[in-house]
Amino acid sequence: MDKIMPNRLDRGFYRYQQEFEEKALEVLRSGWYVLGKEVEQFEKEFAAYTGSKHCVGLASGLDALWLAFRILGIGEGDEVIVQANTYIASVMGITINGATPVFVEPDAFYNMDANALENCLTEKTKAVLVVHLYGQAAEMDKITEFCKKHNLRLVEDCAQSHGACFDGTMTGTFGDIGCFSFYPSKNLGGFGDGGAIVTDNAKIADDMRMYRNYGSRKRYYNEVVGANSRLDELQAGLLRVRLKHMEELTEERRRIAKRYTEQLNNPKLELPNIREHADSVWHQYVIRCEDREGLMAYLEEKGIGTIIHYPIPPHLSDAYAYLGKKKGDYPVTEHYADTVLSIPMYNGMTEEEQDAVIEALNAF
Ligand SMILES: *Cc1c(COP(=O)(O)O)cnc(C)c1O
């Protein structure tokens, strides 16, 4: 068998090849490439998919995050609570605006520990950024309650949670703004960069449309120093194709995850905990192993590729040296960073491939 990769984006393309190719040609032949009817339609369809009133297409997930905080007026002198074990882009969304991230440790589900939020609160706290990491919703009942109680803004980083619900409600719709990425490897991925926000607030949506287009609502009238962060027509068209199949794609990921959970039986491996009421969309299937480096090398030798999400937590990254954090400050986060491993999980994974991964893991 060929080497088994942690992800296979080509499989995602070939499954709907004809639809993607037809849509690409349609857009190319239309003569209209930025902010046209594909983006408009995609925004309508994605808003409906999430159960939000508005969606605004953007150029990336990072743009969705930093523009969200910009529009909420959160910047210099303000603090935003975010989980310490996230992808660094979540934190950049806060710090690009000059605001300060306050890290909270994760719970047993790799999400923000809702019970530790009170300890992070100061007079400067303005918002919570919750990340539905690996595709599983965070404990949203407690988190929304906390935000309401302390009058804080709530922003959701849904870059890994397209379609994931907590208690039947879609992630992205609990707070003020839900931020999405359509980077190719995400559950709803395009063929290049892309992102979006969803919101029920018409003013936020309007402001976001203004910000993404150089701060302009009316051509050549610029109200603020904005960004060039437009989802382009080609990506929007291709995302519309994929979005039509999201239910089937998510079901497939759930089938794969279920098989892993049922068949992995090696006591050296810690399998993911599954939160009640949170129906994971399995962006990643993340296991933990005390001898992670040994496990990775062993799998590599068997022709199985894996990746670490993420080996260096943001507080220990060079980019955030200025925050003055050190090793030992967030022990749970650091332990996860040292032991987590994402095993192959992708749409189009064959049973034969998965059997090979399961057999290798159980024999380790
Ligand atoms: C991918 C990702 C982002 C950034 O999205 P881009 O589109 O790559 O900018 C932000 N947060 C999380 C949790 C992500 O996984």
Image (cartoon, rainbow, N blue to C red):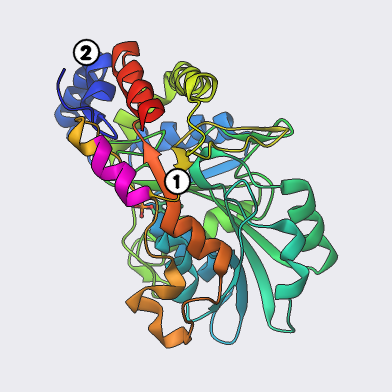
Residue 279 part of the magenta segment: no
Asked if residue 28 is positioned above or below residue 241 in the image, the reply reads below
Q: Which mark is residue 289?
A: 1
Highlighted range, magenta: 292-299
Residue shown at the point (72%, 33%) measured from the top left: 276
Asked if residue 186 is positioned above or below residue 78 in the image, the reply reads above
Residue 20, quarter of the rendered image:
top left
Residue 233 in the image: state x and y as whole percent.
28, 38
Asked if residue 195 is positioned above or below residue 266 in the image, the reply reads below
Residue shown at the point (57%, 32%) measured from the top left: 280
Residue 313 in the image: state x and y as whole percent.
43, 65
Q: Is residue 12 left or right of residue 195?
A: left
- Pointer 2 or 1: first along the chain: 2
Residue 223, quarter of the rendered image:
bottom left
Which amino acid, mark 1?
A: Cys
- State the predominant SS element of the stretch in magenta: helix
Instruction: Residue under label 2, please give it.
Output: 18
The one of 84 and 201 positioned closer to us in this rendering? 84
Q: Secondary structure at mark 2?
A: helix
The one of 268 and 11 positioned closer to us in this rendering? 268
Asked if residue 105 is positioned above or below residue 6 in the image, the reply reads below
Residue shown at the point (61%, 78%) measured from the top left: 79
Q: Is residue 171 left or right of residue 349?
A: right
Which amino acid, mark 2?
A: Gln
Residue 316 in the image: state x and y as whole percent.
41, 74
The one of 234 and 37 positioned closer to us in this rendering? 234
Residue 295 part of the magenta segment: yes
Q: Is mark 2 within 8 Å of ligand 1?
A: no
Q: Secondary structure at mark 1?
A: loop
Residue shown at the point (34%, 46%) measured from the top left: 194
Marks 2 & 1, CB-CB < 8 Å contact: no
